[in-house]
Image (cartoon, rainbow, N blue to C red):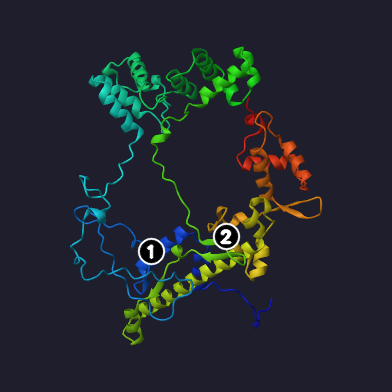
């Protein structure tokens, strides 16, 4: 084999640091973007942020009172306003000659919004949300006096889960206690019996059947016959009740529809998770990236200024670098700051273009709702905007649009198609919306089966199989026909 030298020309894509940063910023969500930005602001002193997220936050003085002094507005950025930047905030009111000097605030009743009879002029803070354990311990301190009994009850309280159930059996709890304490199993049973009389009703139950029975026994104004029947259902036939097998229930209880309906109403008043009300779960909320509103000429898409950071290069450091007084590292940081500002502008511009293209193709959705959604794929938007499909996928992931119909992720507007009898196509999203409409308007005594729903869709020209209806129904978390049936 002979070796030789050859010259050959070829093209290849080089992922420069600037391109890598642009791709990374494009696929980040709003929360991840601001976290990334905070890190970049910490690492690069030449980069400044004009919009402080804490400007509108409540600031407290040393004595706990609210600081009413407005924050000092920063000087506006030099040069033309950046593209995609939020509009400047109006200048805060400085006051007239008769205003109190700085630090001497007016704490009159009118300015505080407090009445003259209020004892404390300071704003009241929300009380801390107590846990289930704290709630039970407070009741125990009032009702139980003996230290030994308190220790046993605290042991059982610590064994409860978040829903108020005692998952560990009393035998297991008794087995892991030291023998020198000489604690009998009956003492634990007595402590559990007392705990089950505490609030919330049903706490300390070992299963769902016992939890419902505890609540039914303490439920006021229930006829004895109905109470006895409801207890029999939850203690012996709870599985049939959950499966809505009313024929077996009526046969086992020897009752008619009216009696079973009254017992069912009593059971439905119970809470199967009595401790869930004390959970400390904080609801998450989504901030939209784009907002769609109805205009005179059609639907208008705008960027949400609240999620768009306003950035600039530090003027002092930039002037020093122009005079040649900076180091090579500062020149690199200056270039990184310019790249970031450009990539940030390009990110929001791409999101806006994609959102406008989506709205243009889904006009019927914004006018008539989900039933008018048309099929849409990533390639259609990519070809329209001259971008790659992977770019559209990054833009539509974890980016949200606020519409008159609610908040939706941009990926929600893309869906597969289903053939129609007329030779056209229907969106799978529109089919899901129709399934929700059909099941929402059905007769509870005679709910629609999957086959019936498929036939109803066929009457509207949408050819769809029964198993596809079942798949969409399960995705929508709609129970099967047997669980939707009622008396």
Question: So how many labels did they put on this image?
Answer: 2
| Nearer the observer, 178 or 189 | 189
Q: Is residue 182 above or below residue 463?
A: above
Indicate the position of residue 413 as horizontal and vertical percent values: 62, 56
Disc 2 crowd, CA 10 A, few/some/many (<14, 14-19, 20+): many
SS category of the residue bearing label 1:
helix
Image quadrant holding the C terminus, namely top right
Indicate the position of residue 53 as horizontal and vertical percent values: 37, 62
Using the rendered image of the protein, determine whether residue 362 is visible from the camera's viewpoint. no
Q: Residue furthest right?
A: 422
Instruction: Give the image quarter of residue 112.
Output: bottom left
Image quadrant holding the N terminus, namely bottom right
Residue at the spot x=18%, y=62% of the render?
104
Residue at the spot x=67%, y=42% of the render?
435
Instruction: Give the image quarter of residue 393.
Output: bottom right
Query: Dots 2 and 1: beta carbons under 8 Å?
Result: no
Q: Is residue 106 above or below residue 164?
A: below
Q: Residue furthest bottom?
A: 323
Looking at the rendered image, the disc whose residue lies closer to the viewer, 2 or 1, is: 2
SS category of the residue bearing label 2:
helix
Q: Is residue 21 above or below residue 221?
A: below
Indicate the position of residue 481 as horizontal and vertical percent values: 67, 32
Q: Which mark, residue 38? A: 1
Tell me how far mark 2 sits from mark 1, CA to CA. Answer: 23 Å
| Nearer the observer, 11 or 469 | 469
Indicate the position of residue 221 as horizontal and vertical percent values: 45, 19
Is 444 left or right of 174, judged from the image as shown? right
Q: Which residue is label 2 attached to? A: 396
Q: Which mark, residue 461? A: none
Disc 1 crowd, CA 10 A, few/some/many (<14, 14-19, 20+): few
Using the rendered image of the protein, determine whether residue 366 is visible from the camera's viewpoint. yes
Q: Earlier in the sequence, mark 2 or mark 1?
A: 1
């Amino acid at each position: 084999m002979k070796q030789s030298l050859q010259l050959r020309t070829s093209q290849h894509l080089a992922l420069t640091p600037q391109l890598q940063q642009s791709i990374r910023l494009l696929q980040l969500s709003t929360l991840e973007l601001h976290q990334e930005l905070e890190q970049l602001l910490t690492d690069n002193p030449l980069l400044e942020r004009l919009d402080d997220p804490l400007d509108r936050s409540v600031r407290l003085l040393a004595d706990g009172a609210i600081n009413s002094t407005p924050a000092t507005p920063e000087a506006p950025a030099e040069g033309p306003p950046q593209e995609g930047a939020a509009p400047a905030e109006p200048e805060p009111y400085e006051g007239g000659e008769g205003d109190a000097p700085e630090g001497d605030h007016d704490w009159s009743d009118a300015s505080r919004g407090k009445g003259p009879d209020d004892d404390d002029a300071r704003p009241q803070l929300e009380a801390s949300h107590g846990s289930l354990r704290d709630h039970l311990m407070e009741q125990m301190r009032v009702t139980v006096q003996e230290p030994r009994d308190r220790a046993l009850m605290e042991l059982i309280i610590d064994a409860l889960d978040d829903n108020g159930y005692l998952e560990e059996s009393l035998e297991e709890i008794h087995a892991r206690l030291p023998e020198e304490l000489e604690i009998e199993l009956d003492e634990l049973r007595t402590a559990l019996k007392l705990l089950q009389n505490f609030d919330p009703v049903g706490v300390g139950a070992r299963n769902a059947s016992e939890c419902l029975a505890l609540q039914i026994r303490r439920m006021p104004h229930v006829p004895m016959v109905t109470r006895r029947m409801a207890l029999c259902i939850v203690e012996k036939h709870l599985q049939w009740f959950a499966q809505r097998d009313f024929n077996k229930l009526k046969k086992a209880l020897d009752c008619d529809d009216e009696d079973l309906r009254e017992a069912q109403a009593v059971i439905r008043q119970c809470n199967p998770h009595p401790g869930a009300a004390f959970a400390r779960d904080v609801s998450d909320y989504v901030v939209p990236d784009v907002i769609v509103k109805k205009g005179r000429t059609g639907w208008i898409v705008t960027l949400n200024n609240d999620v768009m950071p306003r950035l600039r290069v530090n003027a002092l450091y930039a002037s020093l670098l122009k005079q040649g007084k900076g180091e090579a590292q500062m020149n690199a940081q200056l270039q990184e700051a310019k790249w970031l500002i450009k990539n940030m502008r390009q990110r929001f511009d791409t999101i806006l273009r994609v959102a406008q293209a989506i709205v243009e193709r889904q006009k019927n959705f914004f006018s008539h709702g989900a039933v008018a959604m048309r099929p849409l794929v990533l390639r259609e938007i990519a070809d329209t905007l001259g971008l790659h499909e992977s770019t559209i996928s990054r833009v539509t992931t974890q980016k949200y649009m606020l519409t008159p119909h609610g908040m939706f992720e941009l990926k929600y507007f893309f869906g597969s198609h289903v053939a129609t009898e007329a030779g056209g196509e229907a969106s799978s999203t529109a089919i899901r919306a129709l399934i929700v409409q059909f099941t929402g308007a059905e007769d509870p005594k005679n709910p629609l089966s999957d086959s019936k729903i498929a036939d109803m869709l066929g009457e509207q020209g949408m050819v769809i199989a029964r198993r596809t209806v079942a798949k969409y129904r399960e995705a929508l978390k709609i129970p099967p026909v047997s669980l939707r049936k009622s008396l």
